[in-house]
Amino acid sequence: MRVGIMGTGSYVPERILTNNDLAKIVDTNDEWITTRTGIRERRIASDDEATSDLAFKAAEKAIIDAGIDKNEIELIIVATMTQDHLTPSTAALVQDKLGIKAAAFDVSAACTGFIYGFTAGYSFIKAGIYKKVLVIGAETMSRVTDWEDRGTCILFGDGAGAVVLGEVETGGFLASHLAADGSGACELIVPAGGSRKAATAETIENREVYLKMNGREVFKFAVKAFPESVENVLTQQNLTADDIDIFIPHQANVRIIEAIAKRFKQPLDKFFVNLHKYGNTSGASIPIALDEASKEGRFKKGDKIVATGFGGGLTYGSILFEWSK
């Protein structure tokens, strides 16, 4: 049985926050942000939008694109680091919004979350437990962003992307690689709000409930972990980078993507990039990019695609699949 993507969907909030808008909040400017990251603007959720709302809208579009009845979905996996609540799961809230009967759980692997969720969804179908699985990457990063920290607030945005996985006639899933290095946890972390350190008046005042990032170390990690993961899935199928039709990298920094393209001696146009419009949407970045690339006609049936994520954990991973639509 071949398992692949039956449909894709994405949603981003209406509000656009440009680099020039940020320059009014912190000491920065458009040229500085663009040259160092490639980001020009990002989307910000409205006050009444939470992660489950973004996820639900992306899910609806993916189900329509798959051409199936929503009641055929038997499992919902939401990859997110910005859950609506510590409990219940965001996936359970999406299940309720869709009005269907389905199992539901969240995956917490930050920017690699969608890769983890996709692999889990594939495995459930391949094992014969479920027939159709909805995998969503959704984030409201604006809620954990410190808008006084110019080193991080310029990077992140909100959005959601989704895929419906199921049995396909041709192509589909070929290989996966998942990895983690918890020794680097301190390099990308929200220090307070969990069981290690509660969200108290003191931790809120110290701004420990917001994301902290050592940009230099995360960059070094990414340019090492990214090629390692890609090479792993390529080796599993006895392929080289030349055999891949398009790469869908995590949309964190254009400099990282350029470094990876150079590392594999591939033209930059083989790497789909939309971070200039949305910034880093963490677990949502890869499924949003997948949906946009699909809608733009970047894929043709039989194309080999590698999607790679890296982020908090520190986690990293890749999936290799053949386009089935």
Image (tube, rainbow, N blue to C red):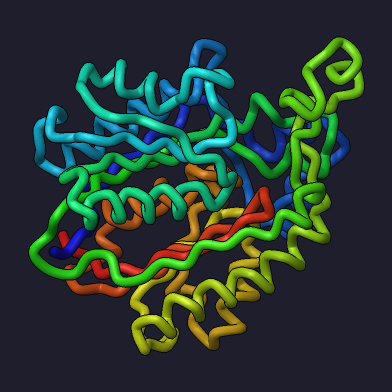
Figure quadrant of residue 115: bottom left
Q: In which quarter of the image is the N terminus?
A: bottom left
Provide residue 5's location: percent of width, then percent of height. Answer: 23, 54
Examine the rendered structure and indicate whether residue 264 appears above or below residue 226.
below
Question: Does the image show residue 219?
Answer: yes
Could you tell me which residue is drawn at 75 percent across and 41 percent down? 189
Q: Give the total number of marks visible in the rendering.
A: 0
In screen coordinates, is 236 left or right of 113? left
Could you tell me which residue is drawn at 82 percent across and 44 percent down? 151
Could you tell me which residue is drawn at 75 percent across and 46 percent down? 188
Figure quadrant of residue 69: top left
Provide residue 281's location: percent of width, then percent of height. Answer: 56, 42
In screen coordinates, is 179 left or right of 12? right
Examine the rendered structure and indicate whether residue 276 appears above or below residue 84.
below
Figure quadrant of residue 147: top right
Examine the rendered structure and indicate whether residue 235 appears above or below residue 158.
below
Report the front residue among 254 and 223: 223
Question: Does the image show residue 6?
Answer: no
In screen coordinates, is 69 left or right of 143? left
Q: Quadrant of the C terminus?
A: bottom left
Provide residue 84's location: percent of width, then percent of height. Answer: 53, 20
Provide residue 42's location: percent of width, then percent of height. Answer: 58, 38
